[in-house]
Every structure is written in C-alpha cells, then in structure tokens.
Amino acid sequence: MRDGTLASGLANLSDRVRVIDRDGTMLGIMIVAEAQRLASEQGGELYVLGRKAGVTVVQIVLVKKAPE
C-alpha cells in the first residue's frame, strides 16, 4: 500500500481475508499481512470488495494515476 496504511475495511494485519488475484483467480484465505506482501510483489494494492460469509474479500489491483 502506498502510504503504509490498511485499506478501508481492514482493522489490523492479522485479520483474515479472502484474496482474489489481479487476474481474478481466487487465492484463498490468508492474513492481511500476507495479502499485502502478495499485492506488493505484483506491483498492486489491496482493494476491499466487501464481506461474504463473515470474511472480508479483497482483490489485488493496480492503481494508476489519472493524467493531469
């Protein structure tokens, strides 16, 4: 994550989240810290999609700056 904070909807690094890859592949449930590491390795960030069955669902996305 660019500014070192958690995405909105995530309380701490040990929370469990269901992770979807940039290409839409379901990666499974893991802790936020691991999901952030994967996102960083892919050059992306975590985006919270919502909650399903009591687990927060996040997707790794690329964030691009809008042209000025």
Image (spheres, rainbow, N blue to C red):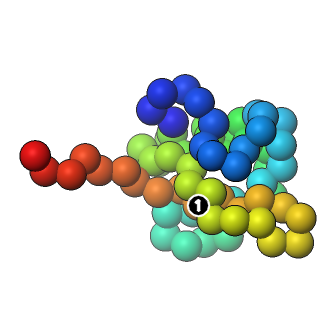
Q: Residues within 10 Å of mark 1 (few under 14, many from 20)?
A: many
Expressed as whole percent of the image width and height from the top left, the position of residue 11 reads: 77, 39
Residue 23 vs residue 51, the one in the foreground:
51
Residue type, label 1: Gln
Residue at image x 77%, y 54%? 17
Dot 1: what SS?
Answer: strand
Q: Answer left or right for 15 relative to 6.
A: right
Residue 3 in percent (x, y) is at 48, 27
Apparent side of residue 45 relative to residue 59 in the rendered image (left or right): left
Does residue 19 appear left or right of residue 41 in this picture? Answer: right
> Is 32 above or below relative to 60?
above
Q: Residue at x 50, y 46 (%)?
A: 45
Quarter of image, res 62: bottom left
Q: What residue is pinned by disc 1?
A: 59
Residue at x 78%, y 34% (from the top left corner) = 12
Along the line of sight, the residue nearer the viewer: 49 or 16: 49
Q: Residue furthest left?
A: 68
Q: Residue at x 50, y 41 (%)?
A: 41
For the question of whether residue 54 can be seen, the reply is yes
Q: How many marks?
A: 1
Using the image as rendered, state which of residue 52 and residue 36 is in the foreground.
52
Residue 38 shows in this picture:
no
Name the foreground residue: 63 vs 66.
66
Q: Is residue 28 above or below residue 66?
A: below
- Residue at the limit of the structure toward the top, as seen here: 4
Where residue 61 appears, as percent x and y from the top left, is 47, 57
